[in-house]
Structures are given as structure tokens and as C-alpha cells.
Amino acid sequence: MTAGLTVAVIGGGSFGTALTSIIAGNGYPTRLWVRNPQLAAEINQKHCNSKYMPDLQLPACVEATSSLEEALAEAELVFLAIPSKGFAQVLEQAKPFLKPEQILVSTTKGFEEKGFKLMSQLMAEITGFQHLGVLSGPNLASELAQKQLTGTVIASADDLTRARVQQVLGNDFFRVYANTDIYGAELGGALKNIYAIAAGMAASLGMGENTRSMLMTRALAEMSRFAVSLGANPMTFLGLAGVGDLIVTCSSPLSRNYRVGQALGEGKSLTEVVESLGQVAEGVNTVRLVKAQADALGIYMPLVQALYLVLFENHSPREVAGSMMGNEQSTDVEFVLPRDEVLKSAQKVTRISTQ
């Protein structure tokens, strides 16, 4: 353990609170920043975040605060667990209290709407720091709070960032694996939210295991196709930050995005879904942003296109379910057999058949 190492977690939602519990449980003094001063006082008094994790008892070494200056003071490692919508704003507010030698790690799975930016890109632009990373993987907060065996990925091009996060977070039930592909890990975490909505909708519509298996596999192909166009390594999607995260969010009712899909499949409107959840799941906004980006770049994403029709153009989930896989038979693994080659072969067969 680094002498005097203090860790800050910025964001007291479900994941931020679960992460705080792990860090403090590993013996590191931990400061948890929450917006609400009353909630901070309650956490310090009762060692519990009643708003997001009422059943989780936090270690006594957790110090909650509503002051960013206080939270960041002397922190060597800073985890940013802020929803994508407010990520840039909070980071700008924190900037005066940050130091270049600090390590910043995002746990946020989403995009900044302005400029279609990832959280790692925002951290680099706003701070200019060198020690930056992304934490991503199949990490349901409720299971982390129960200390169920879980694996995660710290992705960073920086050796110190990867090593320090593995040191601080790793224990008997939380296994931390390293990767240098920060964009791939981050894109996997953001894009899988889209397909969790599709999986929840498919389950609600009574689709079988064969269908759901095909859905997840085609989702993996679609998200890796999109990510590679933005500079990610397709091999990253074979790991925890890719297929691992995709499986858990497409299979678990604990996922907010999955529950959105279930409700849509039951015939509820998006407005009704948001009202019942009390918050917008990240995947809803991600569908809109990714659809616009895919259109602009000419990337084939039939699942995204179909979900967009349901979420934003009031199409019936049952009517578009069949189109979710696309209307054409394409390639299985695109990085083994490119889709363009399959299309050329199909066109050739059509020409021969019509001669």
C-alpha cells in the first residue's frame, strides 16, 4: 500500500457507493462526494447511503462531503462516477482542485452529446492530465455491494494508472484485469446499454432462447463494428468490457436498460417508462446519439435503427421486432469475413440467377 494514499469517489449513486465500499474495505481512506449536504451528513453519521444503497453498511473510514475541494484534497486516485449528462459539468467544477499528478478514472458508461465524446476524451480535454483511465465491465452495483465474485477492466495507456487501480480495487471478490485499449473498453460499456433495451423488449415479447442468443451475438457484432470505426481494437470486445458486460446487461432485470426494454415490450410509452423508473437509463439517450453518428458515418446498425423507431417514433415493438436483425443475411464474424464481400457474393448470385 502506498503510504498516505487517499482515494476520492466523485458521485454517490449506486455504483459510486458500491465502489466506495470496496476501496474503503480494502483499507484505503476514502472520500465520497455527493451533491446533497444532508446526504453527506447522513452517510457520515449512519455509514449508509439510504438514497441509493440503503442495505449497504459503509466502512467507518469513508468520509462523505458535498465539497469538491474537500473530497479531492490529497487524493492520489480519483474515480468519477457521474452520469454522462452531468460528467463534463462536474469535472469543470472540480478542475480548480485537481493536480496533474492525480490519477483520474471514469466509471461512466455513456456519451457526451456535444461532439459525441467519450468520458476519457472529456477528461483529457478538460484537464490535460496524463494519468487517465476507464473502469468497465459486468459490474452490477447491487451484486458488488453483496461482495459477489465480479471481474472488471481498468483500461489505460498509462502503466501507473492500471497498476494503481488494480492495487486499490483488487481483492478476493473483485478481480481487476488490465487493458490498454481505453476506447474499446469505454465504447463497450456505453454501447451495451442499447442492446440491453433490445433484450428486455425481446423477453417481454416472449421470444425464445434461440432468438435472444442471436440477438446478443448480433449485438456484439454491431457494437464492435461501430467501435472499430472509431479506433477501438475488436479484440477488446471478446473480454469483460465487451461480451462480459453485454451478457450481464442483456440477461439481468437488475439492469435499468433491460427494464426499459421490458416495459416497452409491454406496451408502455417512453414517458411512462421514465416515470416508473424515476430516471432515464443511459441506453435511451445512447440510442439517439449512436443512431445519428452511424447515419453520418454510414455504419450498418439495424438493431440501433429499430430501437430508435420504438423509442422516438412511437413504432410498435412487436412490429419492428422482426427488423431488429436486419432484412439481409450478412456475415457472421465481420473481422474474419467482411460484410462487403458477402454482399458482393450475394449480388453475383442474383445476377447469375437472373441471366
Image (tube, rainbow, N blue to C red):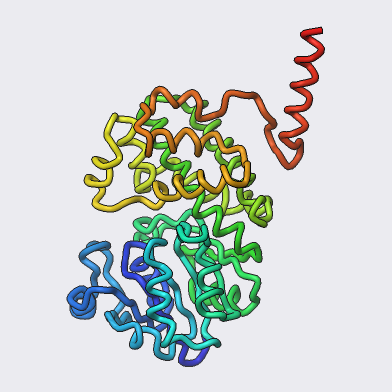
Residue at the extreme top: 355
Q: Tell me which residue sits at (64%, 55%) in the image.
A: 230
Based on the displayed image, in which of its 4 quarters is residue 9 positioned? Answer: bottom left
Q: Does residue 237 sit above or below 69 in this rendering? A: above
Front-most of residues 16 and 229: 229
Front-most of residues 193 and 75: 193
Front-most of residues 214 and 261: 261
166 displayed left or right of 344: left
- Residue 150 in percent (x, y) is at 48, 58
Quadrant location of the C terminus?
top right
Q: Does residue 232 sit above or below 312 in this rendering? A: below
Q: Tell me which residue sits at (55%, 31%) in the image.
A: 214
Q: Tell me which residue sits at (38%, 73%) in the image.
A: 90
- Residue 177 in percent (x, y) is at 59, 64
- Residue 74 in percent (x, y) is at 43, 90
Front-most of residues 64 and 116: 116
- Residue 111 in percent (x, y) is at 48, 58
Q: Does residue 86 sit above or below 226 in this rendering? A: below
Based on the displayed image, in which of its 4 quarters is residue 33 positioned? Answer: bottom left
- Tally of marks: 0
Based on the displayed image, in which of its 4 quarters is residue 39 positioned? Answer: bottom left
